[in-house]
Amino acid sequence: MFTRLPVKIVACLLTALSPASRLPAQEVAGGEEELVELDPIVVVAGKMRRPLSTIAAQVTVIEAADLRRGLAEDLDGILKYEPGLELETSGTRFGATGVNIRGIGGNRVAIEIDGLPARDQFVIGAYSNADRVLVEPDRIKRIEVLHGPASVMYGSKALGGVMAITTWDPADLLAASDGPGAGTLRGGYQSMNDSRVASPTAALGEGPHGLMAAATQRSGHELDNQAPAGTPADPQDWDSADYLFRYTWDSAAGNRLRFTADRLERDVQTRLQSLLGYPPRFGSTTALRGDDRDTNRRLALDFDFSLADWQQGNLRVFDARHDTEQRTFEERAAAARPVRIDRQFYYSQDQSGLEGSVARELEWGGALHRLGVGGEWLRSDISELRDGLQTSLTDGSSTNLILGERMPVRDFPLSRTTETGAWLQDEISLAEGRWQVTPALRWDAYDLDPRPDDIWREDNPDTGVVAVEESRFTPRLGVLLRASELWSVYGQYAEGFRAPPFEDANIGFDIPLFGFRAIPNPDLRSETSQGLEFGLRRLSAFARFSATLFHTDFDDFIESRVLIGRDPQSGDLLFQSRNIESARIYGADLRYTQDLSAWGAALQGWSLDLAAYWAEGENRVSGAPLNSIAPPQAVAGITWTSADAAWDAGATLTHTAAKSAGDIDMSAEPRFATPGWTTLDLAAGWRPLDRLELRAGLFNLTDETYWRWLDVANLAANDPMIPLLSRPGRSYSLSAHITF
């Protein structure tokens, strides 16, 4: 199945295995101590602090320094140079909505910020889209991504992988200060969307106590594109504000208490001019405007501890609220009966949770065991409402009847989900550490409790609701062999699952004007995945190499709101979420980092980074390709740092293959096939003073016109939005960072 491995990926592999990169063990300065610097400590794989080299799975680590050097100001910039990690977007209005890992995205990927889960995404129609990823980039200390099924540690929603984001603590700022206080001030500008950012942060430490306060203000406009001259634009104005307060207490025994309170607000106003007059839906529309507001609030208390023989322990309790309010204003002055339609969409998710884990080392049965055990409880209350008013432009009369729907309506009933899980993992070292076997097992209980109110019942008088109660065990087994001091090989089998979500189990709406009706599915089954992964790693004092092959089978994949036929009595078209019996995704991932000074003194300060990714997927019932799979991509970067670290510069070349028609499911309608593209980015930094860093970047130097596949994957080939979703042409970014 891997016979179609792209030539570029093979080339990267051959480069990594070339004699120049195979440094003899005796030539590695410092031995094992040097390896530590190249072997980051990660938590995401087993919720225990472990060196990456001991993990029998692919984990990608993105540090804050990487984001700063790349001048990343949003999630798009964060994932830009990470093949296999894709940003999911929705048009010019809603922008980024989620993260795609190995062709799986949406609510099938677990996203956590300091251990707190992100909200669920919900989309209904063209005017309602509550996204998942609301995080301020300036707060990010590190991102760890676990690729592939990960339900054994993260339960439902980790069908395709995990993105775990860690934010800064007071100690991180105080570490560079000689006194009790420290702070930073950063400002930045991006020409691609005319955006500006101002971000002050301050920290204070006294004895065991630490305080940190941070605020970030951003504002900007629509993202630039390469649409042909004369194409109507979709002007946009947006701003966001993030506020964080954090208190830490560190005991003499090494325990830590942390309290976090933060709030993120985002406002976006969009004039959707590109759709005006577009038949049939917007044929009579003469004005269309969106006004969207998101608010995230979270409170969290963490306690990291060691107790007797348990060297690592954590307790976390949290409460979070996520609110979306979206308003759409439409004028149909060209209609036979001119009207103005004002629509409102409200979505909220309140989350409360408790999580705990402990880990210890012990010798038993002639082997060293690193044992971890933990459990979680999460309760979510989810609500959604659509409302509206239609006003005649002729006589001023108003009605709450819009396209046959009498507002307000709910597309699913008020819902409460309760998730309870417990897990056990044992990392077993054998043969003096050469072999490592890691079995893990998790038990989950999932409960969906729908709570229909009068609004739901009025719109769905004859529709019953579905309660879901499910429990299951999820296993994982990893095996790792240290073939030598530098080389290791691993294999892993992991399962994932996703319980029937609230909106799919109980979707319900009725649009009489169009003869559309959606109904719940009492027979909806949980999605499951079974993943196989094989990897090869090499770590030396000067180089890091990894190669990964993966194959994942998916059963009972849930397809939302599928046409299932007509109601025999009313003749309405019936829509319902249903299970796809089987799908699969397979592919390869290669990464290679080389300190070029190992090749000669003339290359002191130079380093090379290579990455490549390829995947394919298919519906095993129909044989059609999966449109969630991005085309193959390769990234090559070279950087230089001066001997005194005052200067650095880098160039990054990104190539993405074309998305051919044969790799696209066009059974519903013809779709736009994206051409291949190559971009070149340049970035440089200057530290004229110890506490001042200036950075500049020039992106898409050749002014390439291109599209990312996942930006347009859901659009018809003739959709008027396609030109507007082309990526920015040549642009620049500036940033200044002051430490005090």
Image (spheres, helix red, strand yellow):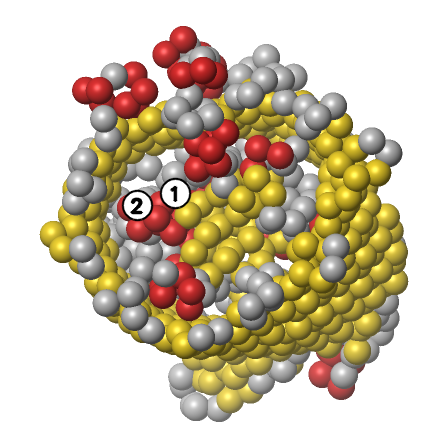
**Above/below status of 451 relative to 475:** below
Q: Name the residue at the front extreme.
A: 252
Tell which of 277 and 697 is nearer to you.
697
Looking at the picture, how far across and down is residue 208, in whole percent?
A: 49, 73
Q: Name the residue at the top extreme.
A: 19
Quadrant location of the C terminus in the rendered image? bottom left
At 42% from the left edge and 53% from the top edge, which residue is drawn?
75
Quadrant location of the N terminus in the rendered image? top right
Q: Residue 470, can we see it?
A: yes
Q: Which residue is mark 1?
A: 80
Q: Residue 476, can we see it?
A: no
Badge 2 crowding class, 10 Å Cα cut-off, few under 14, some 14 to 19, many 20 or more, is many
Q: Which residue is mark 2?
A: 70
Looking at the picture, how far across and down is residue 660, in whole percent?
A: 48, 26
**Residue 105's disc number:** none
Badge 1 crowding class, 10 Å Cα cut-off, few under 14, some 14 to 19, many 20 or more, is some
Tell which of 413 and 155 is nearer to you.
155
Tell which of 290 and 702 is nearer to you.
702
Q: Is residue 371 left or right of residue 632?
A: right
At 87% from the left edge and 58% from the top edge, which residue is drawn?
470
Q: Closer to us: mark 2 or mark 1?
A: 2
- Looking at numbered disc 2 in the image, what kind of residue is underneath it? Gly
Looking at the picture, how far across and down is residue 51, in whole percent?
A: 57, 39
Gap between marks 2 and 1 measured at Cα: 9 Å
- Looking at numbered disc 1 in the image, what kind of residue is underneath it? Lys
First reached walking from the N terminus: tag 2 or tag 1: 2
- Labels 2 and 1 touching (C-beta < 8 A): yes
Q: Secondary structure at mark 1?
A: loop
How many numbered discs, if any?
Answer: 2
For residue 554, which quarter of the picture? Answer: top right
